[in-house]
Image (cartoon, helix red, strand yellow):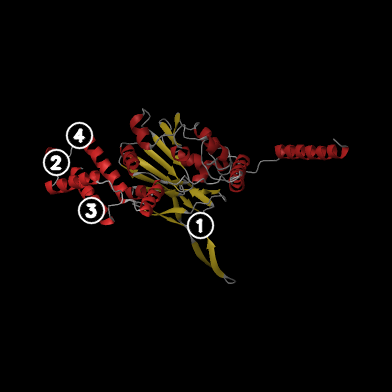
């Protein structure tokens, strides 16, 4: 190998090593996606939040089964049930059991940007989403997006919690004031986003700011009191059931593919591999060998042979020879089928054939007379085309009847 080639190889190796080192030392970008999962340590996960909340309650259990299974198949079916997620949806079956759970004196705490309509209807609560409001002053007229950045709790209205990354637009617009208590609002907008609804002997706590319970705001000294104060309404000496089923599914449902897709580098590697496979299939999946020629099957020449033999007899006009061969085949048929000797074609023979075959007596007699006459002729050229046709019709008629 020449020196110039070694130089090229060295440059490639150094460049590759530099790329690996730079990628290894590159600072991971902050993931701002909202998961609110107890396994995630990113800002809007809930790993640190749950660990800190465990200090508030005597017993905390994390569940990854549906509400129905948790309340009917486990012994941990009393206390407080906590749901903190972006969108909270619930099936009719789970809703029925959750309502019974609260009616019997337990508590449910739900923090979400969207709350299932069937639950709101059951609690006689109406919720709306903030939208645009008109803004007007001496210099401009337009619209601005209303935000819920500064929140306060009604137990201490002087304490404001500034949450600029709170993207929730949910608030509670209508409810039964006799059964519902306002616990939290948006500063300066008269919007209620935290309520307690009495249901039977228990309570539903509905909060419209789930990110307030994430790592980002719970670990912040200026905002962490919001989450701790909101959860302090729940009894501390009872079991707290923290739901992760809606966010992570059942235990064991996490597939290896989901794990790969959770990391950007592995995700893009998978995408590039799939694209490469598709390109390979498109361009390399063509036939690469010589086309196999189609071999036609050998033709059936039986019909051609019959035509040749027929033309041969027709050209020679040897009608007598054809008649002799046809009568010979007929007599052979009678011997094999009816076990009759054909040496003597007398009246007794004819009568036996009529009885065994069921043919018309006239047909059998005419046929046998014609065969006898054919055997007695010494002249090979005596039979005309008409005579041959009549004999052929008699033979075909015999075959048709005798089978």
Q: In front of the other: label 3 or label 1?
A: 3
| On screen, residue 270 above or below 171 | above
Q: Residues within 10 Å of mark 1 (few under 14, many from 20)?
A: few
Per the model, the C-alpha gap separating discs 4 and 3 is 25 Å
Where disc 3 sits, the SS reads helix
Q: Nearer the viewer, residue 283 or 150?
A: 283
**Residue 213 x %, y %:** 51, 42
Query: Is any part of residue 390 visible from this angle?
Result: yes
Per the model, the C-alpha gap separating discs 1 and 4 is 126 Å
Q: Which residue is mark 2?
A: 350
Please identify the residue farthest to the right as the structure is shown.
3
Q: Nearer the viewer, residue 359 or 131?
A: 359
**Residue 318 x %, y %:** 33, 51
Query: Which disc number belongs to residue 341?
Result: 4
Residue pictured at 40% horizontal, 47% vertical = 305
Q: Which residue is mark 3?
A: 390
Please identify the residue farthest to the front as the structure is shown.
378
- The numbered mark, 3 or 2, whose residue comes first in the sequence reads 2
Query: Which disc number belongs to residue 188?
Result: 1
Where disc 2 sits, the SS reads helix
């Amino acid at each position: 190998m020449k020196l110039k080639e070694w130089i090229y190889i060295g440059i490639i190796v150094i460049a590759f090593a530099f790329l690996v080192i730079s990628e290894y030392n590159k600072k991971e970008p902050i993931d701002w996606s909202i998961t609110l999962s107890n396994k995630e340590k990113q800002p809007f996960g809930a790993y640190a939040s749950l660990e800190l909340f465990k200090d508030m309650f005597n017993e905390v259990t994390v569940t990854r089964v549906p509400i129905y299974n948790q309340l009917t198949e486990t012994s941990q079916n009393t206390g407080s049930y906590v749901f903190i997620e972006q969108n909270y949806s619930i099936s009719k079956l789970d809703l029925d059991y959750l309502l019974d759970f609260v009616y019997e004196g337990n508590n449910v705490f739900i923090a979400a940007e969207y709350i299932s309509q069937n639950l709101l209807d059951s609690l006689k609560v109406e919720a709306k989403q903030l939208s645009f409001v008109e803004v007007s002053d001496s210099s401009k007229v337009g619209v601005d997006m209303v935000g819920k950045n500064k929140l306060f709790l009604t137990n201490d209205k002087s304490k404001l919690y500034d949450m600029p990354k709170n993207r929730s637009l949910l608030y509670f617009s209508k409810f039964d004031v006799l059964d519902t208590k306002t616990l939290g609002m948006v500063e300066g907008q008269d919007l209620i986003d935290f309520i307690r609804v009495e249901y039977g002997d228990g309570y539903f706590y509905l909060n419209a700011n789930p990110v307030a319970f994430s790592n980002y705001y719970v670990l912040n000294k200026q905002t962490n009191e919001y989450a701790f104060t909101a959860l302090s309404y729940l009894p501390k000496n009872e079991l707290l059931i923290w739901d992760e089923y809606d966010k992570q599914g059942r235990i064991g449902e996490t597939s290896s593919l989901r794990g790969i897709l959770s990391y950007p580098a592995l995700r893009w590697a998978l995408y590039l591999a799939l694209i490469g496979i598709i390109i390979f299939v498109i361009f390399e999946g063509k036939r690469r060998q010589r086309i196999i020629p189609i071999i036609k099957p050998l033709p059936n020449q039986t019909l051609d042979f019959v035509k040749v033999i027929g033309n041969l007899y027709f050209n020679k006009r040897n009608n007598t020879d054809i008649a002799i061969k046809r009568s010979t085949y007929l007599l052979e048929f009678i011997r094999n089928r009816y076990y009759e000797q054909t040496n003597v074609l007398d009246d007794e023979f004819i009568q036996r054939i009529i009885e065994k075959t069921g043919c018309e007596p006239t047909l059998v007699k005419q046929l046998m007379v014609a065969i006898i006459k054919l055997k007695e002729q010494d002249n090979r050229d005596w039979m005309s085309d008409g005579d041959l046709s009549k004999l052929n019709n008699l033979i075909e008629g015999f075959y048709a009847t005798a089978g």
